[in-house]
Image: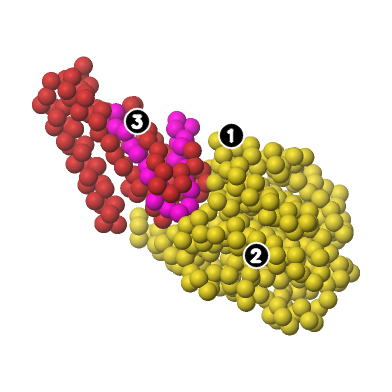
Amino acid sequence: MTSDHDETQGVSRRKILECMTWAGTGVLWTIAGGVPRSVGLIGEAGAAEQPSGLTFLQISDSHIGFDKPANPNTIGTLEEAINKIKALPVKPAFVIHTGDITHLSKLSEFDDADRIISQARLDVHYVPGEHDVIDPEQKLYRERYGRGAKGAGWYSFDANGVHFIGLVNVVDLKAGGLGNLGNDQLEWLESDLKGRSASTPIVVFAHIPLWSVYPQWGWGTDDAARALDQLKRFGSVTVLNGHIHQIMQKVEGNVTFHTAMSTAFVQPAPGAQPSPGPMKVADDKLRTLLGVTDVTFKRGQQRLAIVDQPLQG
Amino acid sequence: MTKIARHIRFAAALAVAAFAVAATLPAASARAAETEVKIEVKIDNFAFAPQRIVVQAGTTVTWTNADDAPHTVVSTTKLFKSSALDTADKFSFTFATPGTYEYFCSLHPHMTGTVVVEAAAAGNAAQ
């Protein structure tokens, strides 16, 4: 059994490494006609491209409450991320947080996260990670962030002609399975998309990747294909996820998948360690592997730019 | 792997010991001896180790989380459900009835395990 398992891991790991574009420093991607093109590193790109259109920020996996050797100061690194957002030359329209706000769903952890994130003075749209729904009554996340949302906390909103959809794939998980959206949410998604023009740019955000990054570590969502089927007819779909604490990008037809860095700690590349647990990296490397993601739509050009900004470097 | 093998041997040794005691001692002591059987399952590297254990009815199984990530121990039939276990936290459950019990971590559902509970030894069952 063990050897079979290892073989499967090996195959998938190769596949994944082929898909993995890079991890660590900032690269600007532009999407034109569904084909991604790397324009350059953050510094050059920032000089060449003045964002005009909608710009928003993604932060993820702040894990407030985590204090193990992989990063004993998750409050400090979240504060650094927020300071980075405050210092941006173009003020983003809003922030999305793709979950694992806290490490253990404690009231004090939610309070600390709120206190720090609110210093950005921007609207923040959240979806929960599995670490945000482990309080005994599973109510702290819903009470704080889920008011007005459906089910376990899914919702949609519009900004500058772009339709944003926040999905929850971290509750009611099945033994042996991966992330899970469930029938209720998929039905809601269908009705939410009904009647929308195929030219509407769509941004979907959820905690666990909606593509199969590495199922052996649970890095995927069992029924994501049913959601993606509903999105096929749209000309521009961007899927933003967290959970894996590293940058990965994949383009499939009109859909761009992107995962963000964590602000808290690093996790290994698929299969690079025995488990996906928090990974200790050299102190002077940590801040090059933590960070935030800046996303810009340029209206009329059908282009989208995703810039990953490490805390340092 | 060696560690798992050791766990399994340990579990087997305990089961044999319980059986031997039950077979040779008066019924009352046999029951006392059996209810004291305890088995440890370690949660390490996002896996339950040993992943499958075989115990006698009445055995208490204790899971200990050795990871830096929280995990849960949840029966697929909702028979038992731990709270989120942080590093070094423990959860115990006593299996009274023979049967096969599947469980998983509700945060990382690719983590699964099995407890097979066998009927208590003959001397005990006869009471």
Residue B55 point in image, percent of width and height: 28, 36
- The numbered disc on residue B94 is 3
Image colour for chain B is red
Disc 3 and disc 2 in contact, CB within 8 angstroms: no
Q: Nearer the viewer, residue A11 or A131?
A: A131
Q: Secondary structure at mark 1?
A: loop
Residue A208 point in image, percent of width and height: 61, 54
Q: Quadrant of the C terminus of chain A?
A: bottom right
Q: Nearer the viewer, mark 3 or mark 1?
A: 1
Q: CA distance from mark 1 to mark 2?
A: 32 Å
Q: Chain of mark 2?
A: A
> Do we see residue A219 in this rendering?
yes
Residue A37 point in image, percent of width and height: 72, 78
Q: Chain of mark 3?
A: B
Tell me which amino acid carries mark 3: Thr
Compared with residue A110, is residue A3 higher up or lower down, i.e. above or below? below
Tell me which amino acid carries mark 2: Glu
Image colour for chain A is yellow
In the image: residue B6, left or right of residue A228: left
Q: Secondary structure at mark 3?
A: strand
Q: Is residue B63 magenta?
A: yes
Q: CA distance from mark 3 to mark 1?
A: 24 Å
Q: How many numbered discs?
A: 3
Binning the other alpha carbons within 10 Å of mark 2 as few (below 14), some (14 to 19) or many (20 upward) gives some
Residue lying at 29% horizontally and 57% vertically, measured from the top left: B1
In the image: residue B38, left or right of residue A80: left
Q: Which residues are magenta?
A: B57-82
Q: Chain of mark 1?
A: A
**Do dots 1 and 2 share one subunit?**
yes
Compared with residue A42, is residue B9 higher up or lower down, i.e. above or below? above
Residue underneath mark 1:
A137
Residue underneath mark 2:
A80
